[in-house]
């Protein structure tokens, strides 16, 4: 290029610029966000398998063990996490259809551990009742369930999640560059 003082293979440089320019498009951004959503779903599955929060801290054990893993009643909450929305600007994952309220109770806790910070009391009956492996249990009130996070709190990405999402973004970017 005259006057710039830079020499080299301008056709090769233009080809690279064309590749990189294509990555700024909506399709490439959406592809990267889709890959990141898949990585998050894999991380949630690992959390269920290892019974750990995204931070790596183990979930608190059940107060009334029933021989099943923590956060497992029917298996529905731990399976089939899904992409709710994927665009060029953002992505959202969520629990299986029909298990949204169970997710909220587990993610944010209930009773004294939840948002209200108060014990759970019966609304109509004199006592609460629930089935255990030994039969039925009864109580006038219960503390509730502690938080057992499946996804990180908004704005706080734990180190493992940062690392995994960063690697997935780089791998996806590399794939997109190689396709062009």
Image (cartoon, helix red, strand yellow):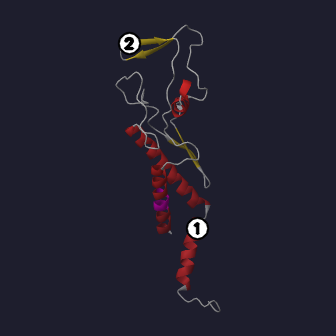
Residues 74 and 137: in front is 137
Residues 172 and 163: in front is 163
Quadrant into which the N terminus falls: bottom right
Residue position for label 2: 135
Is residue 172 visible in the rendered structure shown here?
yes
The percent position of residue 159, horizontal first and vertical second, equals: 47, 51
The percent position of residue 5, horizontal first and vertical second, equals: 60, 91
Residue 11 found in image quarter: bottom right
Q: Is residue 103 left or right of residue 61?
A: right
Is residue 110 visible in the rendered structure shown here?
no
Labelled disc at residue 31: none
The percent position of residue 78, horizontal first and vertical second, equals: 44, 35
Residue sitting at 47 percent across and 50 percent down?
Answer: 161
What is the span of residues highlighted in magenta in the rendered image?
Answer: 168-172
The percent position of residue 26, horizontal first and vertical second, equals: 61, 60
Residue 101 lies, with reference to residue 123, above or below; the image says: below
State the separation of the CA atoms marked 1 and 2: 63 Å
**Mark 1, secondary structure of its residue:** helix
Residue sitting at 56 percent across and 89 percent down?
Answer: 7
**Mark 2, secondary structure of its residue:** strand
Residue 19 lies, with reference to residue 1, above or below; the image says: above
Residue 58 found in image quarter: top left
Residue position for label 1: 22
Q: Residue furthest right?
A: 3
Residue 75 found in image quarter: top left
Is residue 169 magenta-colored? yes
Residue sitting at 51 percent across and 31 percent down?
Answer: 106
């Amino acid at each position: 290029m005259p006057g710039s003082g830079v020499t080299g293979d301008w056709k090769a440089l233009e080809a690279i610029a064309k590749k990189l320019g294509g990555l700024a498009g909506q399709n490439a951004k959406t592809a990267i966000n889709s890959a990141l959503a898949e990585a998050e779903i894999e991380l949630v599955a690992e959390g269920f398998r290892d019974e750990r929060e995204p931070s790596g801290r183990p979930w608190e054990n059940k107060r009334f063990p029933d021989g099943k893993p923590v956060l497992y009643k029917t298996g529905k909450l731990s399976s089939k996490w899904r992409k709710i929305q994927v665009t060029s600007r953002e992505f959202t994952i969520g629990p299986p259809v029909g298990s949204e309220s169970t997710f909220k109770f587990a993610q944010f806790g209930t009773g004294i551990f939840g948002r209200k910070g108060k014990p759970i009391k019966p609304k109509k009956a004199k006592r609460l009742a629930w089935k255990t492996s030994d039969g039925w249990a009864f109580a006038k009130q219960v503390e509730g369930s502690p938080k057992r996070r499946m996804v990180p709190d908004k704005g706080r990405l734990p180190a493992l999640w940062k690392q995994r999402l960063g690697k997935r973004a780089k791998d996806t970017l590399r794939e997109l560059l190689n396709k062009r």
